[in-house]
């Protein structure tokens, strides 16, 4: 019996290839579709690329943007590096915590949001800044961040 | 007395007929253009400063039938955002710069390795790539360009780590030699250049080495993009000639109360007020990939140093001990001194550790942690202790 995951990974391997250099693009798409790379996906990717599952885990876990633990549909990453820090990034995090009830490193019970700190997003001149999934947001204020999150709650 | 900074407007100039420009270089000949590039003095704009012309020459002269051109768009140095601005405003110029490198070196394939944080730029880049690939057919150049995304690892900006990541491995730097120009992506000769470097190659193709050299100084030719942020009168990306002093920079961008400028990001140097006048920004003084962070007297240098060390501790790839353990110990060390759990003389021991890291670490990450550490401790010791 072929599980759905097996089929899904096999399709990704058809799309990106079965070479070692196909691994990162495959991992990226697994995260896009499943929010994180679960054990089943790692085992199936290993089979497709003919490498060990430990190798898949070792590579995936190296990268901050390839989640290997369950995380929310919308991943919020608030920049913690110096200039955003000087521009009160903690006010942004507090506003997020107040609205959705999670601190950095946590995921909401409904599986909708995860919150992390991240390193320099390259928006120092427009800090404080954050990413939600692939979308960048800059020049944040607690007010602004609440409006942004409300728009994601509806998604 | 505020001296006027020399501004230039070359990098974002987009009204250039790129295929006509490549055609001009094709008529000029590969060797002639390489001499031109070497003559221009262009050094890599990512921060390390290797001569670009020499890099292209080595790859060109390699007999391997397979070669690659890689654009390093893994801009992760704290305080740097100029590559993002280039990719947003002058993406075509980057892509044509890579095409130029492909023509000169004979590489048929290229990749832009772009950090995951800039994924939102991918649609724009794909359109620009399609347009370029359609245009070069008439020129008879065969070059295929693709995008590869990073995944949130600062160390992948180091070229050997970047190549590891492109090949699907953990982004851990490898020993040099072999250098990427000899054995790069998939073991083939590879040109790895920063986004801004490809743009500069196009500028040199357009105006020639003679004109290009008129900009900047003898050791630092050309113009440079600076990412300016912090306690400033104005923040953003500015194109300036190299060779100015920190004082000139502060006169233009400071808020009137500048205490220190961090030149070159977390891995760069902290220049205190007393050194502003005699510190030149460029390869003859403090080199920079473009990051300029300005701090005024309300800022605690302890907080700044702690923030940098948290950054390095998280981003160290962990494969070599001096960097993995060193970054942790430096961070714990300054915290212990601050909490009075260690005497202030402990800072001298930490300085020795930073010195060891500089010589014993495998790659530029561990080697450069000591830059900010030493320059902040030496100039602001009392702020770290009390």
Image (cartoon, coloured by chain):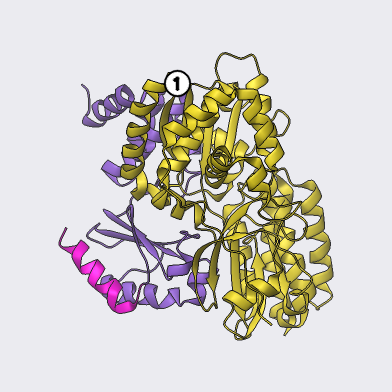
Chain colours: A purple, B yellow
The one of A84 and A77 positioned closer to us in this rendering: A84
**Magenta stretch, overall SS:** helix
* Residue behind mark 1: B141
Residue B193, by quadrant, is: top right
The reply to whether residue B43 is in sight is: no
Q: How crowded is mark 1: few (under 14 residues within 10 Å), some or many (20 or more)?
A: some
In the structure shown, which secondary structural element does the residue marked by tag 1 occupy? Answer: loop
Task: Looking at the picture, tell me which residue is in the foreground, B150 or B353.
Answer: B150
Q: Residue at x 81, y 65 (%)?
A: B351
What is the span of residues highlighted in magenta in the rendered image? A140-155
Picture quarter with the C terminus of chain A: bottom left
Q: Classify the position of the N terminus of chain A by image quarter.
A: top left
Q: Position of residue B341 (x, y in %)?
A: 74, 78
For residue B268, side relative to residue B311 (left or right) = right
Q: Where is residue B143 in the image (x, y as percent from the top left)?
A: 44, 24
The numbered mark 1 sits on a residue in which chain? B
Does residue B375 sit above or below B189 in this rendering?
below
Image point (58%, 35%), residue name: B192
> Is residue A153 shown in magenta?
yes
Q: Which residue is drawn at 44% across and 73% down?
A: A89
**Identity of the residue furthest to the left in this view:** A154
Confirm whether the magenta stretch covers residue A132: no
| Count of marks, rendered view | 1
Viewer-side residue, B10 vs B328: B10
């Amino acid at each position: 019996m072929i599980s759905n995951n097996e089929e899904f990974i096999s399709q990704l391997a058809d799309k990106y290839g079965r070479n070692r250099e196909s691994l990162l693009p495959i991992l990226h798409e697994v995260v896009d579709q499943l929010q994180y790379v679960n054990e089943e996906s790692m085992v199936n990717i290993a089979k497709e690329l003919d490498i060990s599952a430990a190798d898949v885990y070792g590579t995936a876990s190296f990268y901050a943007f390839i989640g290997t633990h369950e995380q929310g549909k919308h991943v919020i990453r608030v920049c913690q590096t110096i200039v955003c820090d000087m521009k009160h990034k903690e006010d942004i995090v507090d506003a997020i915590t107040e609205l959705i009830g999670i601190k950095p490193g946590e995921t909401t019970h409904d599986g909708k949001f995860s919150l992390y700190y991240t390193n320099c997003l390259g928006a120092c001149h427009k800090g404080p800044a954050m990413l939600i999934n692939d979308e960048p947001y800059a020049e944040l204020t607690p007010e602004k961040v609440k409006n942004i999150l409300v728009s994601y709650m509806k998604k | 007395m505020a001296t006027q900074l020399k501004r230039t407007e070359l990098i974002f100039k987009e009204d250039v007929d790129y295929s006509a420009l490549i055609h001009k270089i094709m008529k000029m000949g590969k060797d002639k253009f390489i001499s031109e590039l070497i003559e221009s003095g262009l050094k890599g704009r990512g921060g390390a400063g290797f001569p670009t012309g020499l890099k292209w020459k080595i790859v060109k002269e390699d007999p391997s039938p397979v070669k690659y051109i890689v654009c390093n768009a893994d801009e992760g140095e704290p305080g740097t955002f100029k590559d993002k601005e280039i990719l947003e405003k002058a993406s075509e110029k980057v892509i044509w710069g890579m095409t130029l490198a492909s023509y000169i070196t004979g590489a048929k394939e290229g990749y832009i390795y772009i950090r995951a944080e800039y994924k939102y730029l991918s649609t724009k880049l794909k359109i620009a790539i399609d347009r370029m690939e359609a245009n070069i057919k008439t020129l008879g150049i065969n070059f295929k360009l693709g995008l590869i995304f990073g995944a949130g690892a600062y160390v992948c900006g180091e070229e050997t780590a970047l190549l590891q990541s492109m090949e699907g491995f953990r982004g851990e730097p490898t020993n040099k030699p072999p250098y990427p120009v000899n054995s790069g992506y998939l073991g083939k000769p590879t040109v790895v250049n920063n986004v801004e470097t490809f743009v500069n190659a196009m500028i040199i193709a357009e105006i020639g080495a003679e004109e290009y050299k008129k900009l900047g100084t003898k050791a630092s030719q050309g113009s440079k993009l600076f990412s300016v942020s912090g306690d400033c009168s104005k923040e953003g990306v500015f194109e300036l000639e190299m060779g100015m002093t920190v004082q000139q920079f502060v006169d233009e961008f400071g808020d009137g109360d500048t205490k220190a400028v961090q030149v070159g990001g977390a891995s760069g140097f902290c220049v205190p007020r007393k050194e502003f006048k005699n510190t030149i920004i460029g390869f003859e003084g403090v080199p920079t990939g473009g990051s300029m962070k300005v701090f005024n007297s309300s800022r605690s240098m302890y907080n700044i140093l702690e923030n940098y060390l948290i950054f390095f501790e998280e981003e160290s790839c962990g494969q070599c001990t001096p960097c993995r353990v060193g970054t942790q110990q430096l961070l714990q060390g300054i915290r212990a001194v601050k909490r009075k759990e260690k005497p202030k003389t402990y800072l001298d021991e930490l300085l020795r550790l930073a010195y060891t890291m500089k010589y014993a670490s495998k790659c530029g990450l561990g080697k450069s942690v000591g830059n900010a550490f030493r320059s902040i401790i030496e100039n602001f010791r009392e702020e770290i202790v009390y």
